[in-house]
Image: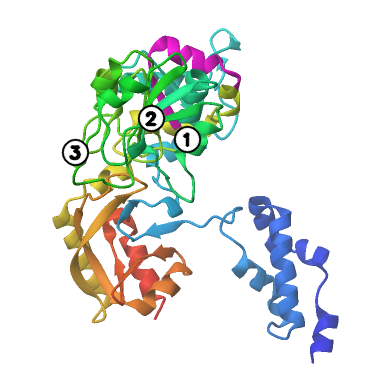
Amino acid sequence: MHADLRRTVPSTDGLLADPRLAEPQRRLGRSLVRLAVHAAQERVRGGALHPEELVNDVLRHLPAHATSLRPVLNATGTVLHTNLGRAPLSDAARGALLAASGYVDVEYDLGDGTRARRGRGALAALRTALPDAGDVMVVNNGAAALLLAITVLGAGREVIWSRGELVEIGDGFRLPDLVACTGATVREVGTTNRTTRADYVAALGERTGCVLKVHPSNFRLTGFTASVAVDQLASLGPPLIVDVGSGLLAPDPLLPDEPDIATSLRAGADLVTASGDKLLGGPQAGLIAGRAELITKLRRHPLARALRVDKLTLAALEATLCGPPSPTAMALHADPNELRARAEAIAAELGDEAEVAASEGVVGGGSGPGVVLPGWVVSLPERYAAPLRVGEPAVVARVERGRCLLDPRCVPPSADGDLVRAVLACR
């Protein structure tokens, strides 16, 4: 039987010429459709598929998009889930990405037909959001922002840094290694749990390039501890770089221990660095704000060209800064009563296996360690977790104590129906 089927398998070129595969080739590209054709042909040769069903099988197995990345419903309750891409973009930012995907005036003045400053709209929006900054700059991520600042101010010199802030930020990435690769020497001061201003003063010398303060945002140190505030470090003399990490622009009562860029600038920091895809709720980017003359030095350094952002990032960042509240902000400040109502409505459609329970979400992304986000979840048997991950849409839940927990905090309300259908499809 298999030999007969092999003789009846249509040729690849013949299948690609089928009118039913014309639109998918325009949308996804010939290569992706060809791969789907080859896979279907193998199913025919193996006896699992009849030749007459080959084209329909190809259509069933074609991806929705020309990328291997799959959209996911984040039902974990972790707002900034690093493995799921951290901050989801707002509709405004997504629209800006689409608008910027073709030819745009990213570095061109349409009025006089000459070259213009790159990303001027996004930079203007960031300056407006940070009026205490003399100037601002955007690079491709938070680590790049710190790398550029240290390179300009500390290369070949000493960077004075508290031992309690020598952090690893994930996946084995350690900030001291990043500083060392700039050619700067880390001059550690204080101890793991206690550092005083006198420790910094004792370390100052002719080789001092700058003082660095890093917020250890992915852990908390409690007990017999001491650290030095930004305003006290600002009076030491050398340039002060403050890395606030999570990209909070201004104070948020929900996150009382999370430093923000505006407060650090007002306290006297010369440069402040942060990420754009965390608490700001924007695209991956490194934000730098501070004294205008220092920003000019950073902008003119050759490394700045290697770290610059593309037009898509600039568009999404500007829309995030100027547009409506981001999904991150809405998830962080979600009303627990509304979350409970949504959970109960979802559970009602799922039947007896679904229960509603109080639960706690987290900020995630190395932000707000220890911050509790009260909420509610739909609790299902653990067996649902694996098929939900590979379903359509893909749903990532939280598994605790033998239960699969669906937290609606990070799921758009408009997607509650999709969540219900995904669960029902697993039965």
Q: Are marks 1 and 2 in contact (CB under 8 Å)?
A: no
Closer to us: mark 1 or mark 2?
2
Q: Secondary structure at mark 1?
A: helix
Q: Secondary structure at mark 2?
A: strand
Residue 231, given in percent of the width and then of the height, sits at: 24, 20
Q: Nearer the viewer, residue 132 or 315?
A: 132
Q: Nearer the viewer, residue 329 or 146?
A: 146
Residue 252 got which mark?
A: none
Provide the residue designation for mark 2. 161
Kind of residue indicated by mark 1: Ala
Q: Which residue appears at 82% of the width and 82% of the height?
A: 6
Residue 119, given in percent of the width and then of the height, sits at: 50, 22
Q: Nearer the viewer, residue 126 or 205?
A: 205
Closer to us: mark 2 or mark 3?
2
Residue 220 is a magenta residue: no
- CA distance separating discs 2 and 3: 24 Å
Residue 143 got which mark?
A: 1
Q: From this view, report whether residue 362 is shown above or below residue 402.
A: above
Q: Which residue appears at 40% of the width and 35% of the height?
A: 276
Q: Are marks 2 and 3 in contact (CB under 8 Å)?
A: no
Neighbor class of circle 1 (other Cα within 10 Å; few <14, some 14-19, many 20+) is many
Residue 252, given in percent of the width and then of the height, sits at: 21, 36
Kind of residue indicated by mark 2: Trp
State left or right for residue 6 relative to residue 372.
Answer: right
Q: From this view, report whether residue 77 is shown above or below residue 307.
A: below
Mark 2 vs mark 3: which is more N-terminal? 2
Q: Quadrant of residue 407?
A: bottom left
Which region shows up in magenta?
286-302
Q: Residue 161: tell me if it is visible.
A: yes
Provide the residue designation for mark 3. 256
Kind of residue indicated by mark 3: Pro
Q: From this view, report whether residue 408 is shown above or below residue 183.
A: below
